[in-house]
Image (cartoon, grey):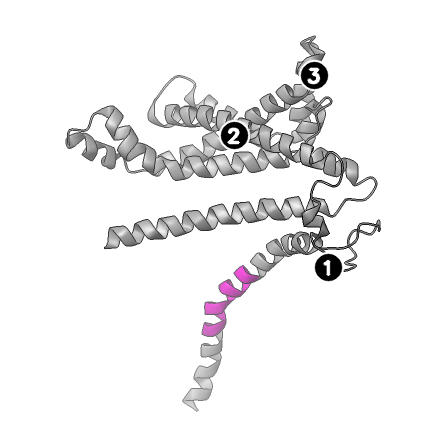
Amino acid sequence: MSDVLRRPGRIRLWIGDHLVLALGLLVLVYMFVPIAVVILMSFNDNSNSRNIYAFRGFTWDNWSNMCNPTGMCSAVGKSVQIGLLATVVAVILGTLAAFGMVRHSFKGKSAANLIVFLPMASPEIVLGSSLLALFVSSGNSNLLGFRAIFIAHVMFCLSFVIVTVKSRLSGMDANLEQAAMDLYANEWQTFWRVTFPLVLPGILGAAMLSFSLSFDDFIITNLTAGQTTTFPMFVYGASQRGVPMQVNVIGTIMFLVSITIVIGNELNNRRKARALAA
């Protein structure tokens, strides 16, 4: 009789222990289903059909003829080039700004913290149209294009870099730097041997986020592109006639590169943890 009475409690306990795990798995499935569709469609032999979502058969041609749609590889190269340049500049400026905002007190610091969030909170159509008006009013029509896209991408990536690095700096234990200086390390040695390695994961995370945002951006890029065509703009133009399957190949490659970086970083962290434990 007592086992019967305890059984509902055991069931509730089992459900409580496994509900969060089940919900987490459902969320992961929900997130990765579109990625799985992109990977599947990269092998789809459906070049002659406007119904791009119909799987006609398996083929390697999409991978072997990756640049078959005229201008696609050029657009991808342009997006990668802009993304890398914007990421480097945004990470350098954003990291310096984050150090200044966390480590120093100055007049207008609260206002500066608020202003940093404005590009993140503003709709992209507002930022894009404002930048277009700025570049056109400058009187130099040649400014639109690669340079305008680069300036625009640095602008909106900068906020994400500052916020990411600031969160890393705010959570860092200042006693570690003081301990290094107590052991006769000067400020330069303390920065490169203690501070920078601790902040580096935040900087790398900000860099990956910046490159992803730059490579993926369409609205701001479309308003400031002029005659320049990036990969998102190429996909938008191609969608009017039917998206080529090679677009899914580029998407799959970008996903594999991202997941490789994440897995490599995790394996490196585990290796360091084992070395410290030993």
At numbered mark 2, what does the secondary structure look like: helix, strand or loop? helix
Residue located at (73% from left, 33% from top):
71
Q: Quadrant of the N terminus?
A: bottom left
Query: Do the CB atoms of the residues marked 2 and 1 lie less than 8 Å apart?
Result: no
Q: Position of residue 4 (x, y in %)?
A: 46, 87
At numbered mark 1, what does the secondary structure look like: helix, strand or loop? loop
| Residue 17 falls inside the magenta stretch | yes
Residue linked to disc 3: 133
In the image: residue 236, left or right of residue 213 = right
Mark 2 and mark 1: Cα distance apart in space: 37 Å
Residue located at (79% from left, 41% from top):
239
Q: Amino acid type of disc 1?
A: Phe
Q: Position of residue 215 (x, y in %)?
A: 61, 35
Mark 2 and mark 3: Cα distance apart in space: 24 Å
In the picture as drawn, the residue positioned furthest to the top comes out as: 139
| Residue 125 falls inside the magenta stretch | no
Can you tell which quarter of the image residue 27 is in?
Answer: bottom right
At numbered mark 3, what does the secondary structure look like: helix, strand or loop? helix
What stretch of residues is rendered in magenta? 13-25
Residue linked to disc 1: 58
Task: Give the number of the mark in front: 3 or 1.
Answer: 1
Q: Quadrant of the C terminus?
A: bottom left
Mark 3 and mark 1: Cα distance apart in space: 48 Å
Q: Nearer the viewer, residue 256 or 87?
A: 256
Q: Main secondary structure of the magenta part?
A: helix
In the picture as drawn, the residue positioned furthest to the bottom comes out as: 1
Q: Position of residue 121 (x, y in %)?
A: 58, 32
In the image: residue 198, left or right of residue 38 = left
Residue 87's label in the rendered image is: 2
> Please, is residue 18 above or below residue 68 in the view?
below
